[in-house]
Amino acid sequence: MSLLEELVVTSALDELPRVIDFVAQACETSAVPEDVAFACQLAADEACTNIMEHAYDGRTDGEIRVSCWVSGDQIHLQLRDNGAAFDPGIIETPSLDGNLTDRQIGGLGLHFMRSLMDEVRFEFDPTTGNTVTMTKRFHGAG
């Protein structure tokens, strides 16, 4: 297992490019295929945006810790924050059918993350806060 440097950013939306660049660099350093790296970048963008907008409710003074590591044929992304607790069980599976104006708002980000990654796991601890860990399998360099 190779642990890469951890990135710490604030919860300001203008930090998103730093998170995406960090994930891209981690994937490149670990010879992760381009399609897998792209999925990881999109999933990290969505997870980080959710933390900024929901866990920190738009506040810019929060902290987000981003870690990436490879173990075998899997890349793992982990984002940790101390914002409001998140329970993914309360998010209904979004309807992807029908008219856009009839669809319920919300839930697409979580659906998007789960579609991009092979595993998405959420944990909450009153002391350490929220942790989302996402895993994507890959085979060889691309």
Image: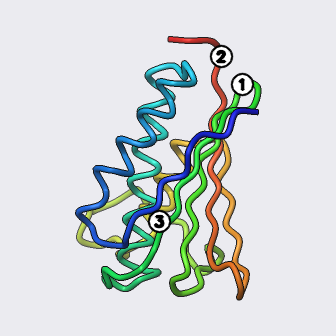
Figure check: 13 above or below 128: above
Q: Can you say which quadrant of the picture contains the N terminus?
A: top right
Quarter of the image where one finds residue 97 = bottom left
Residue designated by label 1: 73
**Residue 49 or residue 108, whichever sits in front:** 49
Q: Separation of disc 3 and disc 2 at Cα? A: 31 Å
Please state if 92 lies on the left or on the right of 125 as rendered.
left
**Residue 86 or residue 63, whichever sits in front:** 63
Q: How is the image coloured?
A: rainbow
Please state if 126 lies on the left or on the right of 55 as rendered.
right
Q: Which amino acid type corresponds to the residue marked 2 in the rendered image?
A: His
Q: Position of residue 125 (x, y in %)?
A: 73, 81
Label 3 or label 2, whichever comes before in sequence order: 3
Label 1 or label 2, whichever comes before in sequence order: 1
**Residue 87 or residue 33, whichever sits in front:** 33
Residue designated by label 3: 94
Q: Position of residue 91 (x, y in %)?
A: 55, 75
Contact between marks 1 and 2 (CB within 8 A): the answer is yes
Q: Position of residue 122 (x, y in %)?
A: 67, 66
Figure check: 14 above or below 24: below
Residue designated by label 2: 139
Circle 1 SS class: loop
Q: Separation of disc 3 and disc 1 at Cα? A: 31 Å
Residue drawn where x is 59% and y is 40% of the image:
4
